[in-house]
Image (tube, coloured by chain):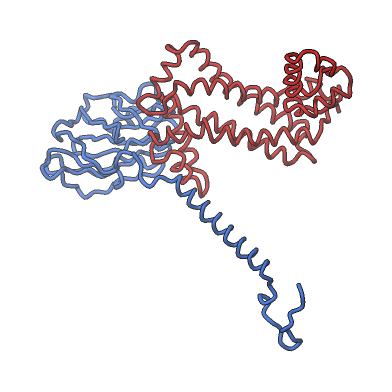
Chain colours: A blue, B red
Amino acid sequence: MSVNPYETKENKLHWLAEVTRRQFIAIIGTLVSLGALLFGGFESLKFLFPNSTSDPPLRFIVPIDPTSVTVDNPYMDYQHRVGIIRDDGGFYCVQLVCTHLGCTPNYYSNCVTNTPVLPATAESHGERTPAERIPNGWICPCHGSRYFIDSTNFYGPAPRPMDWVNIEFTPDKKQFIVDRSNIVVYRNPGQVTPPLWRIDPTTGVWNGKVL
Amino acid sequence: MSSGSYEQNPIKAFASEVWGSVFRHGLPTTDKVAARTALTNFFLHIHPVRVKKSAIRVSYTLCLGGLSFFLFIALTISGLFLMFYYIPSVGQAYQSIKDIQYVATFGLVMRNIHRWAAHAMVITVWLHMARVFYQGAYKPPRQFNWVIGTALLLITLLLSFTGYLLPWDQLAVWAITVGTNLGKYGPIVGPVSRYIMLGGRNVGQSALTRFYVLHVIALPLIGFVLMVIHFWRVRKDGFTGGL
């Protein structure tokens, strides 16, 4: 670069004044290319994130008559991955997502075969009448985790009970509304006491209990 | 290619010219011609002109890298055949696999070639890495090729993983559910990686589409480019064999 004729020893010009036309274009060109690359890269990455998905909705209507769900006949919706259970206290809804690695456990009227579960333990989870000695619940098809009907895990690699999600009646009390985005009972590993959260079997009103 | 026949028989001369334009050298009868053939032929130039006899001892490398590449070629060809029948849609994927097995001529063989070659490739790539590791073949000047090799191992495993979903049977769906949930436990990008892999929260149509595209286009292409660099550097770094 040649010596700037406007520069004196006392009055040094800004370094940008020394930049030649070619250098200026090179700098601007580099900056614009980098900017375009960053913007393009970012937008390309964003393209891979779907703005909408074809997943089933998290809040949905279960189109069954609440009276058809009885103590002996819980309702499983494997598509939406929830189970609606009726017991003496009322209704509750278990989200059928295994706490191990997220498969959908299947419902079995006998979930304790070939497990070392003690009769006393089994009795405290889900057995409702003394006549029914065999507890019902879920078995996960992936790694064999098992859950009692109150979603307490008792066998296999599952670390904690499955979550309960909000359930309510539709205004005409003829169907259920389940909201999987609203987890009402979350239990940590080792927290095995059966929760008391229920909605009333006739009015559909929450009994106000959290666990 | 003697110039004498050029004036005598035009058809023979034409044939000779065509042949000569494709194969620039005759049979490698002398060392000089052999060297020139290796240098000017696309398929031969991947080999060095001269190799030490000790370097091609089979017991040294056990041919594991070559076997992996052979299996990759076998998988590419058999996979191409399978693509003619396979339909990546949740409603039709399983049925199309059944069609391949029971309707297409030798489809069962083709699918099994693909399946068993895939299993074998995972094994040979792992063994190849173990061989390189135990012989210290990752040391200078081959550090970068080791890094490319680990990337190729990762691509092999990802190809295996993505291919697992395509039959869309129970095993496939739950294996990918479990696999992507495992990925969710990764730091920072874990939950994001699951969403981007599945294109949603569950293993559904978007997951099948994504895995299909990754399996048949993206991963093989990246793998091929890395393989080219891998082989190039193997050639340039030379053989140390028979230490």
Q: Nearer the viewer, residue B84 or B180?
A: B84
**Residue B59, percent across and down?**
78, 20
Q: Is residue B116 left or right of residue B229?
A: left
Using the rendered view, name the quadrant where residue B152 is placed: top right
**Residue B51, percent across and down?**
84, 25
Would you say residue A124 is visible in this rendering? no
**Residue reaching furthest front?**
B7
Quarter holding the C terminus of chain B is top right
Would you say residue A168 is visible in this rendering? yes
Q: Nearer the viewer, residue B172 or A4?
A: A4
Q: Is residue A64 left or right of residue B178?
A: left
Q: Is residue B48 left or right of residue A193?
A: right
Q: Is residue B63 left or right of residue A94?
A: right
Quarter holding the N terminus of chain B is top right
Q: Nearer the viewer, residue B211 or A206?
A: B211
**Residue B123, percent across and down?**
63, 24
**Residue B118, percent across and down?**
57, 23
Using the rendered view, name the quadrant where residue A82 is placed: top left
Q: Can you say whether A91 is above or below B242 in the image?
A: below
Q: Residue at x 70, y 75 (%)?
A: A18
Q: Can you say whether B236 is above or below B56 in the image?
A: below
- Label count reads 0
Q: Can you say whether A209 is above or below A97 in the image?
A: below
Q: Nearer the viewer, residue B197 or B3?
A: B3
Q: Residue at x 55, y 59 (%)?
A: A35
Q: Can you say whether B74 is above or below A58 in the image?
A: above
